[in-house]
Amino acid sequence: MRDPYLVLGVSKTASEADIKKAFRRIAKENHPDRHANNPQALERFKEANGAYELLSDEQKRSQFDRGEIGPDGQPRNPFAGGGGGGFGGGGGGFGNRSERDFAAGADDLFAELFGGRSGFGSGGRGFRTQVRGPDVAYRLTVPFSDAVQLAPQRVTLRNGQTIEIKLPAGLESGKQMRLAGKGEPGPGGPGDAIVTIEIASHHVLEREGDDVRLILPLRLDEAVLGAKVLMPTAEGSVTLTIPAGTTSGKMFRLKSRGFRRTDGTRGDQLVTVMIDIPPDHEALKAFAENFIDGRNPRATFDL
């Protein structure tokens, strides 16, 4: 029997993570599902599995380091207790583990490395790969208002089945959602559906981070005299009170009307008003010609 440290190619001071990493590398390189007709690879795989079994057990590793047990996991003193086994002893090359235990370990490793099941020892017929079906990619365009409100969406799969999905907080274009078991079928079970989200644009609302922006046009009389103006949000229309004497560029903040964040809070809706002057309005021209305003609104420009 070979020294388990030499089998895995690690030093005696190797950490648990180093030992696991070395085992994974050897197991992946020599896994029987990749080398079904290579008995040497199978032996290396079983030898590495036995070495990892010993070194990953803190008690067994300490006993081996103290010389109390050999690389086969058996006591050094032949009268201290018996039992065949070891990596390649009477136990069929599986140490103290039965073939069923070794098969379970191989299955777990294969599932972790390759996304399937090895089927080792099934009916004594050796390794048989059971790979999951392929994943299927979908693209889902979500209306802007639905994205803000995280309204449930319906997705029609390739098989014609329609399912409803719940949108997550922190939603952005490019976000991917994995629907387990909704991919193509396979001997190891179906794959997954991978849904990539695209948030549609809105005709007047615009996203800025987690906030929603709106440019709100006002008539001159609404800005001068004040008014109550109906305006859109992602959750329906609301009435905004415009104070008398409002100028273009003034911004109003509607709290918690924006996108939902992952921490449960929400952005705001930011409304910037712009005074819309009608062209060729004779009465307005006459008023402006006789209107006297002695202020200089550009005084701060230092021109």
Image: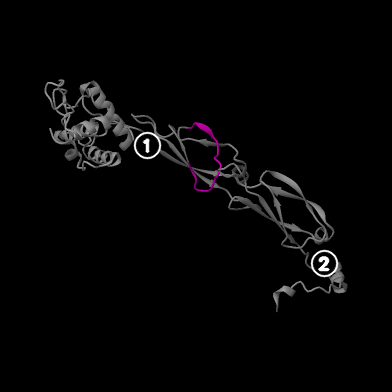
Q: Is residue 36 visible?
A: no
Give me the residue at 49% from left, 48% from top: 174
Where in the figure is residue 37, as x and y percent of width and height? 16, 34
| Relative to 186, residue 287 above or below | below
Image quadrant in which you'd find residue 285:
bottom right
Q: Are marks 2 and 1 in contact (CB under 8 Å)?
A: no
Residue 103: where, in percent of width, then height?
25, 26
SS of the residue under disc 2: loop
Is residue 186 in view from this perspective?
yes
Q: Residue at position x 52%, y 36% from top?
A: 155
Residue at 70% across, 75% down: 301
Q: Position of residue 3 (x, y in %)?
A: 15, 36
* In the image, residue 173 lies in the stretch drawn in magenta: yes
Residue occupied by mark 1? 134
Q: Amino acid at mark 2?
A: His
Would residue 105 be found to the left or right of residue 257 on screen? Answer: left
- Between the C-alphas of marks 2 and 1, the distance is 66 Å
Q: Main secondary structure of the magenta part?
A: loop
Q: Which corner quadrant of the image does residue 16 belong to?
A: top left
Does residue 18 belong to the magenta stretch?
Answer: no
Q: Is residue 92 above or below residue 10?
A: above
Which residue has dot 2 on it? 281
Screen quadrant of the N terminus:
top left
Q: Which residues are magenta?
A: 160-176
Tally of numbered discs: 2
Mark 1 residue crowding within 10 angstroms, few (<14) / some (14–19) / many (20+): some
Identify the secondary structure beneath mark 1: loop
Residue closer to the observer: 25 or 199: 25
Q: Amino acid at mark 1?
A: Pro
Q: In the current view of this chain or complex, which residue is farthest to the front?
A: 66
The numbered dot on residue 209 is none
Q: Earlier in the sequence, mark 2 or mark 1?
A: 1
